[in-house]
Image (cartoon, rainbow, N blue to C red):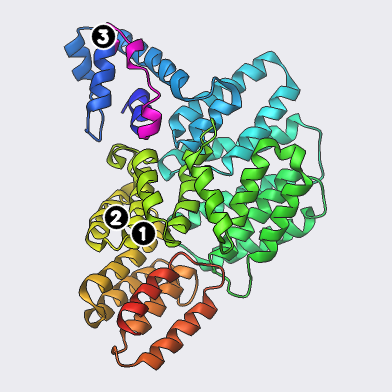
Amino acid sequence: MTLLEEFIFSLNRTERGKLRPLQFRGVKRKVFRKIITTTDSEGIPPDQFISQLKITQKRFYQIYAEMLHSCYHDVAPAGGTELLQYLGNMQLYRHFYIEMKRQEKELIDAKDSKALEDFYFKVLLMSEFFLIPPNKAGKIRPELLKYVTRYTKVKQPHPCDQRFIRCTEIEQEMYQNFMRNFSLEKLKRSVDELEEIYRCVRGKDHALAKFKVTYILAMIYFWNFFPEKKPEPYLEFLKQIINDHRQTFGSVGELMRMGVESYTRPNPADISLYKKFLDHPTPTGEGSSLLFIERFLPMIVIEGEIAWAKKFIADRFPLNPGQLHKDIAMHWWRLLVIYYIHSNDFLKAMETLEKAIASNTGKTRNVTLDINLRCYKIFLFVMLNGPGTASEEIGKHIRYARRHGFNKGEGFMMLYLKAVSDLVGLSPFEKEQAQKIRARYVCELASETRLFPLFDKIYQKYYT
């Protein structure tokens, strides 16, 4: 798939409306029309176009480059780190990598160390809010790790620089751990080292180091891998960091604060804020970012804003997620599953879930996300078939999770699987015992509120 096709396929209905087809003439008009109307998930083979248009391969790629630049102009910010932020928020990581390297080289050639320091800082900060898929991580993640080292060399030295570098290395190790053969022991060693770094940097003025280590710890504890540790103290400290370094973080400070607050139970004012943010994305695309849509949309849907969500999906989701790289498409399919579940359209949810599962395969397969999808599959199985035949099905998924390192009682997904398993093992007449299982689960789940509504739907339908 060419960069031009990838760019157009990633755009939602609203963004596609900004493209100006009349700017293209002749061969470019034919190319644009073909791309905009195709439903092929692989795009259009270059050889097919070259043959049909009777042009050379060199001219073909020149045309595509010129058209891509024109499409950037229609939809994206003009240049600099704002363009990079847009490309990253839109999950256009091939584009991001090429543009990132181009801008870095330009600044190095200009020998402007202050501008280069500012560039590295902004790229490292914005990358904290990107959902980089495995098939792109091979290039981008190592390059960002190099940026950490280059940033510490070009700026004024700070005592926390080496801890910042080590924090980034640990993050990469944890990422690999979650991808395959998850090990709780490895995660514990990583967390222990991060806690040591946290204690060392929390009283210092290195904004990036403090933010990064605190954010990672908050996310790990939010997932409830270590029930004795709660995310709330780290979330509160993140708010303090954002407040203390408002000038350093600049325009993304408010976005960071809103993201942090979304990890606590929302009130009606929060839901209104999330809707406003997603409905009115900034020019750099934060409101269209998959990371933020994944964070906010399920909370909005769980609160019953189904009509709003339906319109948002029509306007702001890619027209055909199947045309995206499958490791990105899987996230969009998963969001649609959540929407259909809370719309009580369980058949459509199961159909979409199968697309999500099919996207999470091959070299880019993520075991953690696989188990998450299985949590939704169990819910749909129970709602469509009843609890009587569900025990064996749930047991199969629990065994799968344990084989992949998610041991008994560790992580909020295992808590959910165990709670549903215990619940469906009861007859509908054992209401008192069902109530006890629900109460225990509520006590165990701490801050996690995404899967609990699924458990509660089963409980309300069959055991009240």
SS class, disc 1: helix
Q: What is the x, y in percent for residue 101?
A: 55, 25
Q: Is residue 64 above or below residue 279?
A: above
Q: Are marks 1 and 3 in contact (CB under 8 Å)?
A: no
Q: Earlier in the sequence, mark 1 or mark 3?
A: 3
Q: Residue at x 49, y 31 (%)?
A: 87
Q: Which residue is mark 1?
A: 370
Q: CA distance from mark 1 to mark 2?
A: 7 Å
The answer to which image quadrant residue 36 occupies is top left
Q: What is the x, y in percent for residue 277?
A: 53, 43
Q: What is the x, y in percent for residue 369?
A: 40, 57
Query: Which region of the structure is painted magenta?
Result: 10-28
Q: CA distance from mark 3 to mark 2?
A: 39 Å
* Amino acid type of the residue that numbered disc 1 sits on in the rendered structure: Asp
Q: Which residue is mark 2?
A: 357
Q: CA distance from mark 1 to mark 3?
A: 44 Å
Say whether residue 427 is magenta: no
